[in-house]
Image (cartoon, helix red, strand yellow):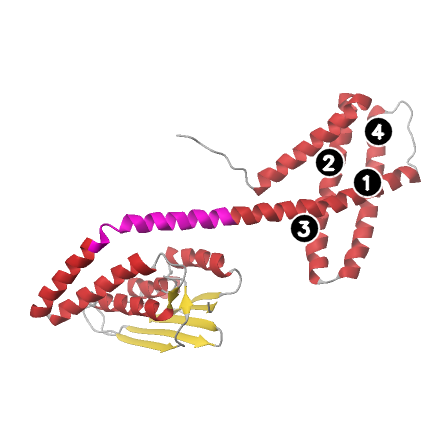
Amino acid sequence: MQMSFKPGINQLQWLVWVFVLLAVMLSLLPMDGFAQAFVYALLNTLFYVAIVYGNILLLFPRLYQKSKYGWYVLSVIVFLAAVGVIRGFITMYAYNLWFAMHPEPMTTKAIASFIIGGIMVFLLSFVFRIAIEYFKLKQRSDEIMAQRTQAELNLLKSQVQPHFLFNTLNNIYYEAYLESPRTASLIERLSDIMRYFVDEAPKQLVPLATELQFLENYIALEKIRIRHSIQLEFTKDFDQGISLPPMLLMTFVENVFKHGIDKTSTNNKVAIKLVQEGNRLVFLAENLVLAGAGVHQSAGFGIVNLRKRLVLLYGDDLILAVQNNGTVYRASLNIPLA
């Protein structure tokens, strides 16, 4: 089996700084010898790190990106001056302590050279930041492609001769219709669900009406597993022509029937709401908390995986909330319309 190693962003940054350390040391080695070159290279590299990350992690995001341009310029000047002075005194101290035959005083010219050098490193920090953002974007793109590929593989695994299966279901439907129309109706819903998995699930977007029909078919099939009827209120209010990624709402409905229905109870209440509010779509699913579950009832891994998918699709432009007050379990989703 062939193994490949792809370093992450943190590993790449470590490699960059090790390379800088070696490059600085090799440039000093002919003049200063190994020990002095190593000490100077290590000190210089540490101050380069302080300047680069001080800008891209502290000053730039907290000041410049918040439109505090004056404060940013002032802070940069003070920051570079302070780093230059500290760097000068530490470097001179190390030189006098370990390498100088006679101690030498720190001069204004030397400090000025350290500050000017810091300005050059500060300018390079923007190139460093752009490189980091590029690798983050590429890493996220690779993750999305990997997830999409895995989803396609899973879908292919589930498509075992779909046309044969659909034709068989149709034949069973016609036979059942003659004997039991209710059974035939359930077979028809099952066939529609499987067609959804094959034809609609691989798409980027599906009509909301198609997604709704899929949910209603699923609910109808789930009801046959429940001994008593349930009180189900399904509110729908949205414009035609709306589309959304497939299978976004299924997790909520599945959780209702998996965790919120007592098959032996006659008091099962479920409320589902799918409405359009301006340019956003709001979905809400509520059910009674089963006796003994209390406030510790969990939504399981379905909601966790759904949240990861939603972040990939919408970034921060979404609201996914789960509440359990011990009596009612409520899950809601608010997303922008496609």
| Quarter where residue 210 is shown | bottom left
Q: Nearer the viewer, residue 305 or 92?
A: 305
Q: Position of residue 262 (x, y in %)?
A: 25, 67
Label 2 or label 3, whichever comes before in sequence order: 2
Mark 1 neighbour class, 10 Å CA radius: few under 14, some 14 to 19, many 20 or more: some
Report, in whole angstroms, how far the alpha carbon at label 3 lies from the one at label 4.
31 Å
Residue identified by numbered label 1: 117
Position in image of residue 28 (x %, y %): 78, 26
The disc, 2 or 4, on the residue closer to the chain's N-terminal end is: 2
**Is disc 1 placed on a helix, strand or loop?**
helix
Within 10 Å of disc 3 (Cα), the crowding (few <14, some 14-19, many 20+) is few
Look at the image and tell me whether residue 328 can be seen.
no
Comes first in the chain, label 1 or label 2: 2
Q: Nearer the viewer, mark 1 or mark 2?
A: 1
Distance of mark 1 from mark 2, alpha carbons?
A: 12 Å
The amino acid beneath tag 2 is: Thr
**Was residue 275 drawn as part of the magenta stretch in this picture?**
no
Q: Amino acid at mark 3?
A: Leu
Which label belongs to residue 57? 3
* The magenta segment: 141-163
Q: Specify whether residue 157 is painted magenta.
A: yes
Q: Residue 85's spot in the image, x, y percent? A: 85, 42
Q: Position of residue 224 (x, y in %)?
A: 19, 67
Q: Describe the element under mark 4 as helix, strand or loop.
A: helix
Q: Is residue 313 above or below residue 123?
A: below
Badge 4, how many Cα within 10 Å: few under 14, some, many 20+? some
Circle on res. 245:
none
Q: Report which quarter residue 248 is drawn in.
A: bottom left
Of circles 3 and 1, the one toward us is: 1
Instruction: Please name the residue that numbered disc 4 is placed on.
Output: 95
Earlier residue among tags 3 and 4 = 3
